[in-house]
Amino acid sequence: MAGRDHQLSAAIAAASTTRDVRIAAGSLLAMPAILRQTAPAVRYVIVADDNTWAVTGQRVAASLASAGLPDSDPIVLDEKPRVKASAETARTLASTLRARGALPIAVGSGVINDLVKYAAEIAGTPYVCVPTAASMDGYAASGAALREAGFKRTFACAAPVAIVADLDVIATAPAAMAAWGYGDLVGKLVAGADWIVADALGEEVLNPAPFAMVQDNLLTWLADPAGLRRGDPKALDGLMRGLVMSGLAMQAHGNSRPASGSDHQFAHLWEMEEVTVGGVPVSHGACVGIGCLSMLAAYEWLLGQDLESIAPAALAARTPSPVALQAEIVASFPLSFMAANAEIETAAKGATPERVERRLRALQCNWPNLSTRLRKNLPPTETVRGWLEAAGAAATADAIGISTEKHAADFARARLIRRRFTGLDVLHDLGWLGMAANAFNKGRKT
Ligand SMILES: [Zn+2]
């Protein structure tokens, strides 16, 4: 316990905004003391939805009242069938916060947290987060994913000053939400591998401290998926800790690289396309879990190839020209906002033949070390699939409404939507993206 708290303290010391994190059963009892110490304000306002207000918001309100902390009427968002993460709602919320001069306490999961995070940023106030489910890694992250003008994008905004995760509260969330969080957390296996590769190929230097914050304890946090499904407190503690540490690592590094690689590129693609199952949008974590399995299979396939006999100059000569890339983007994204986004992101990636040749040479000459490191860092795809199944999470592309054909095509598309250099770019440089894509479904059959 002491060791785990030490890790958390060290991560907080390196974080840009967050100054206090509690992850324990009963931690809501410390709320008044945390507010006085970390988030002093003239008055507070609880922001929740119907459900989180009834389950937890009222308890927070009562603890503020009994400690004599000034509170204004709660803001209970009641959009039906569910509160949506819209930039418009966040702006309205920001006006209310400003008018009341109140510091918001977000009581909820992903959507409530993102709405309050952005609203607090606009209103120029810090905020405090009370997570009600271990459902995703955004609690401690800077930036909020909100919809505007028809599509979701990330708005820059500060992380919460304090996170009070009461495991007794989180244990009452539906088990499916912890399975989403587990999917988001397994993605860090691939995010770590992508960063190792980007560093070895001279594309992006690996920042050791934020890397270690996520990777050093990842397998421990992921160790008990079956326990998670049963609601075991220790398993839930590990998951919540992993998700919060991921956010703190992003704060320490200044962007999402420590917690988001090609696994999230698939997820962003599917979220932009609004994949659904039975009319219900697929969760972020479920998309990340399948993105992670996709890339584990691709890396596994890559590790079986002979990279020391590749011909970097000849391969680099096949780098798509800007015109060819533009044509690929238009053909890949019928939705114009996605095509426009891909154009900006691929331009920022700047894959010229010279650059591709340089990194292929680096790949070739570093491969003995790099492949050893990747083998050490990446568990087998089927092992991770087993973990996801044990957690009750989606474990096949089909389970999140993605057909085999679409899934195979999405390896090429996922590479186009974010400027971040990942394993998808390596496979593309080698001309092996299609073959690696097939590995996912082949692996399933054997
Ligand atoms: Zn995520």
Image (spheres, rainbow, N blue to C red):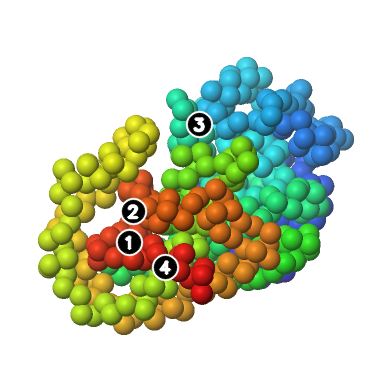
Q: Which circle, 2 or 1, is nearer the viewer? A: 1
- Residue type, mark 2 in image: Ala
Disc 3 to disc 4, how far (Cα)? Answer: 34 Å
Asked which secondary structure carries label 1, the reply is helix
Q: Are marks 2 and 1 in contact (CB under 8 Å)?
A: yes
Q: Amino acid at mark 3?
A: Arg
**Which numbered disc flags the more N-terminal residue, 3 or 4?**
3
Q: Which mark is residue 147?
A: 3
In the image, the residue with mark 4 has its CB under 8 Å from the nearest atom of ligand 1: no
Q: Classify 10 Å Cα crowding around label 3: few (below 14), some (14-19), many (20 and above).
A: some
Which residue position holds label 1? 434
Residue behind mark 2: 412
Q: Secondary structure at mark 4?
A: helix
Numbered disc 2: secondary structure: helix
Label 2 beta carbon less than 8 Å to ligand 1: no
> Splitting the image into 4 quarters, where does residue 182 fall?
bottom right
Query: Residue 217's x, y, as percent?
Result: 58, 69
